[in-house]
């Protein structure tokens, strides 16, 4: 059987309006998925539209010089079908925050420099200290750690405030990530309040001001012409039930293919056009790789409760409900998101022992009662088991797949932290 696919040889095509509304499904993935006998997996595969399922499997092949090429295979992918990206937007915000640090061209300011957030508009909040960090202060590096390790929400909102709503969207669109939209923090605010972002300052170890960024306001309007409504009802803030679809039209938007491209541009920057990359240093990339793949239980700052935040806590394709363990020879570099019944994961998986690597990006909607914002979703019974089966199906295929050249994966063989046995209390129950 001939495989129908688009081969990406060192470059990714931009999303274009000509692809809108065209559902992409490759015969290869239909055949691969049909072989599974798991009932939950087959229920969703056989009814992809009901579960708003979209999958992109990215096969990676190396030449004799170890240069990678990428082949994307699609299952029910349609950029016009809205899904709530939830915490996956923390990935582009981390990239943009590091990019902005480097664009300041101030040698006194790095990703580790202490920063403080002030307030200057309705519902804005201050953040001058962060006792979970080693210095006791927020920093871009520490915000990224918390956003990646267990997907905390406040760090995302602070990065949103640092970069600014206008610059976030301008910078993503300028890089060719055209069908994206970042409109809000992860706190309850009006659209007007989200257009205003806080004053931010950087200070040295003595507390002396290095740089002050004033409050900002986004004057650029959004394009909300494509309506996105979902469900048969929703709960309001006071728990009243409204019998009407929930409106996502003005919420964040990050199409699945864009999410996959963002992760590829992070892990394999030379494989995408220069325009689509971010202004990052070698140390920035190393830092991102570490905290996209490090486990909460390996991390000292923040010192997360490793029982609550187990190894596979934000690794959906390897989230075994019985053991919560990932094979010792495997590392997953990824970002997940979950909200309103949507579960999404963009992953790069590396098996160092078996010389296996691949990318897998997927989103699924599990909300059988059709009511949104009620915190009653089918994540544990349907969503997580499905994504685990999806991950293991592709992983097993990759273990069996023959390669012309075995990959050298040393670039991703990192030295991870080891938890120090000190008296500090562990961090539990964060908002994520």
Image (cartoon, grey):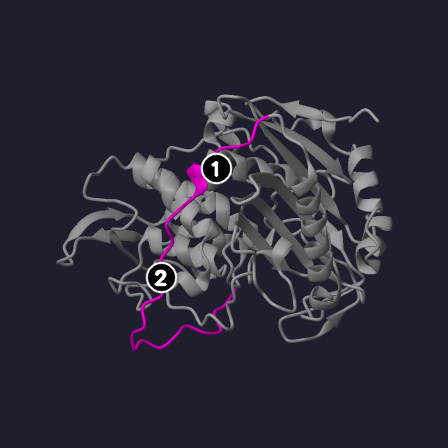
Quadrant holding the N terminus: top right
Residue 216 image position (x, y, % from top left): 37, 47
The quadrant holding residue 87 is bottom right
Residue 402 image position (x, y, % from top left): 67, 32
Judge left or right: residue 124 versus residue 383. left
Q: Residue at x 52, y 66 (%)?
A: 310
Front residue (pair 133, 354): 354
Q: Is residue 310 above or below residue 213?
A: below
Question: Badge 1 local density, few (<14 within 10 Å), some, or many (20+)?
Answer: some
Q: Is residue 113 above or below residue 305?
A: above
Q: Main secondary structure of the magenta part?
A: loop
Front residue (pair 403, 145): 403
Alpha-carbon distance for marks 2 and 1?
22 Å
Q: Residue at x 69, y 55 (%)?
A: 387
Is residue 28 visible from the viewing direction of this image? yes
Say whether disc 2 or disc 1 marks the residue closer to the N-terminus.
1
Judge left or right: residue 112 versus residue 309. left
Q: Residue at x 74, y 72 (%)?
A: 241
Local SS, label 2: loop
Residue 134's mark? none
Front residue (pair 374, 364): 364
Q: Is residue 408 above or below residue 368?
A: above
* Residue that label 1 marks: 409
Numbered range of the magenta stretch: 405-432
The quadrant holding residue 413 is top left
Residue 375 image position (x, y, % from top left): 67, 70
Asked if the residue at tag 1 contacts the one at tag 2, i.e. Cβ–Cβ closer than 8 Å, the answer is no
Judge left or right: residue 209 versus residue 37. left
Question: Badge 2 local density, few (<14 within 10 Å), some, or many (20+)?
Answer: few
Residue 418's mark? 2
Front residue (pair 374, 88): 88
């Amino acid at each position: 059987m001939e495989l129908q696919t688009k081969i990406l040889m060192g470059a990714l095509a931009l999303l274009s309006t000509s692809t809108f509304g065209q559902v992409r499904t490759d015969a290869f993935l239909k055949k691969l998925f049909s072989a599974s006998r798991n009932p939950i997996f087959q229920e969703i595969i056989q009814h992809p539209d009901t579960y708003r399922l979209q999958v992109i499997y990215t096969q990676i092949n190396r030449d004799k010089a170890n240069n990678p090429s990428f082949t994307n295979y699609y299952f029910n992918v349609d950029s016009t079908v809205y899904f709530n990206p939830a915490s996956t937007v923390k990935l582009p915000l981390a990239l943009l925050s590091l990019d902005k640090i480097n664009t300041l061209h101030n040698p006194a300011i790095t990703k580790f420099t202490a920063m403080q957030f002030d307030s200057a508009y309705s519902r804005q909040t201050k953040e001058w200290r962060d006792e979970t960090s080693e210095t006791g202060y927020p920093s871009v590096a520490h915000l990224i750690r918390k956003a990646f390790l267990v997907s905390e929400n406040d760090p995302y909102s602070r990065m949103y405030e640092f970069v600014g709503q206008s610059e976030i969207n301008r910078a993503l669109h300028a890089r060719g990530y055209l069908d994206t939209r970042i409109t809000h923090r992860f706190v309850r605010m009006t659209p007007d309040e989200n257009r205003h972002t806080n004053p931010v300052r950087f200070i040295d170890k003595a507390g002396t001001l290095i740089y002050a960024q004033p409050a900002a306001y986004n004057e650029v309007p959004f394009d909300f012409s494509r309506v996105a409504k979902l469900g048969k009802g929703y709960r309001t803030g006071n728990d009243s039930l409204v019998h009407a679809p929930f409106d996502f039209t003005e919420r964040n938007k990050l199409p699945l293919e864009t999410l996959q491209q963002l992760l590829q541009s992070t892990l394999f920057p030379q494989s995408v056009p220069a325009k689509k990359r971010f202004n990052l240093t070698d140390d920035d990339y190393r830092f991102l790789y570490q905290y996209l793949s490090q486990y909460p239980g390996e991390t000292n700052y923040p010192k997360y409760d490793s029982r609550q935040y187990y190894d596979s806590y934000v690794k959906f394709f390897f989230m075994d409900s019985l053991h919560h363990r990932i094979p010792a020879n495997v590392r997953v570099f990824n970002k997940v998101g979950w909200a309103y019944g949507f579960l999404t994961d963009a992953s790069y998986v590396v098996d160092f022992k078996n010389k296996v690597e691949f990318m897998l990006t997927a989103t699924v909607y599990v909300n059988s009662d059709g009511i949104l914002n009620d915190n009653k979703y089918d994540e544990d019974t349907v969503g997580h088991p499905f994504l685990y089966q999806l991950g293991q199906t592709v992983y097993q295929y990759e273990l069996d797949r023959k390669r012309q050249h075995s990959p050298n994966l040393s670039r991703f063989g990192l030295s991870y932290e080891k938890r120090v046995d000190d008296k500090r209390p562990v961090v539990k129950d964060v908002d994520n």
